[in-house]
Image (tube, grey):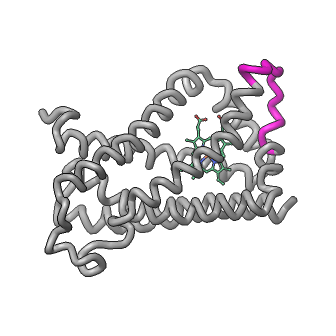
Amino acid sequence: MAGITSSIGRKYAMALSAIFLLIFLVMHLSVNLLSLFGQTAYNNASQFMGYNPLIQFLMQPILMVAVIFHFVMGFVLEIRNNKARPVKYAMNKGEANSTWMSRNMIITGLVILAFLGLHMYDFWYHEMNYKYIEGLPVEENRFWGDLHNKFGSIWRVILYIISFVLLGLHLAHGFQSSFQSIGARHPKYTPFIKAFGNWYSVLIPLGFIIIAIYHFVTQ
Ligand code: HEM
């Protein structure tokens, strides 16, 4: 079995962290979409997510580790690839045989990293401060209003939307690439994985974009 210190092991671990994050994004979007259908549904879901010990003290740390691992490993793989291949492949004729998305995963990844910095400050830091630093009482109706107010600023909406578009580009290559790396290659299934990945990389960012715009225009 290839360990994490081997090249194949690293690619495999990278792909597993990616697939975990792909699943997280679906869950994250599903909860956030509730905010379009009324305050109660979103408040109840957020209250559950925010105060359930299993989610708070098991799932949340696992997610944080997965996010950090994914970024660190992304850089490690990029640096190693560049070292192994100081002169670009003669075969690699840029646009001719690779997509812009596949060649710029580090760039789109860095934009997502910067977005996460802002995003954690916007929501996560605020939440940690509320619960664990200030120790304020449970107030199950605060979540929808907090989210709604955040999107009152046009600049935040623009920054978020730019990030979601780049997230889409990152996913457009990342989805199918992660399945390839875990060896899901088959004449029958590969076209399906690619098509599913294309839909995923459009629909997930679009869902987030709709949420940001909805809260901005309904201020
Ligand atoms: C309109 C779009 C989005 C909204 C409204 C939104 C909203 C939120 C909210 C309310 C939290 C809760 C913080 C907490 O209670 O702990 C959160 C956490 C988080 N979001 Fe988002 N989010 C959006 C898009 C995204 C995207 C695109 C990503 C990933 C690229 C992302 C990644 C995260 C992560 C990693 C957390 C931390 C989860 C945790 O441990 O609590 N979010 N977001």
Q: How many marks?
A: 0
Left or right: residue 182 versus residue 158 is left
Residue under the image location 73 percent in, 34 percent down: 126
Relative placement, left or right, of 47 versus 205 is: right
Residue 177 lies left or right of residue 35; in this view the side is left
Answer above or below: position of 49 versus 86.
above
Name the spot of residue 218 as percent of width and height, x first: 84, 62
Which of the 4 quarters of the picture holds residue 36? bottom right
Which region is colored magenta? 131-144
Location of residue 193 in the rendering, given as x and y in whole percent from the top left corner? 31, 61
Picture quarter containing residue 219? bottom right
**In this view of the protein, which residue sits in the foreground, 161 or 187?**
161
What residue occupies the far right of the structure in this picture?
219
x, y percent for residue 102: 33, 65
Quadrant in which ligand 1 is drawn: top right
Quarter occupied by the N terminus: top left
Looking at the image, residue 108 sits to the left or right of residue 155; the answer is: left
Residue 113, how many percent across, how many down?
A: 52, 49
Q: Residue furthest bottom?
A: 96
Q: Measuring 49% from the left and 34% from the top, which residue is drawn there?
A: 63
What residue is rendered at 33% in x and 66% in y? 103
In magenta stretch: residue 136? yes
Residue 100 forms part of the magenta stretch: no
Q: Is residue 99 above or below residue 186?
A: below
Q: Closest to the observer: 128 or 143?
A: 128
Identified at 20% across, 73% down, the residue is 92
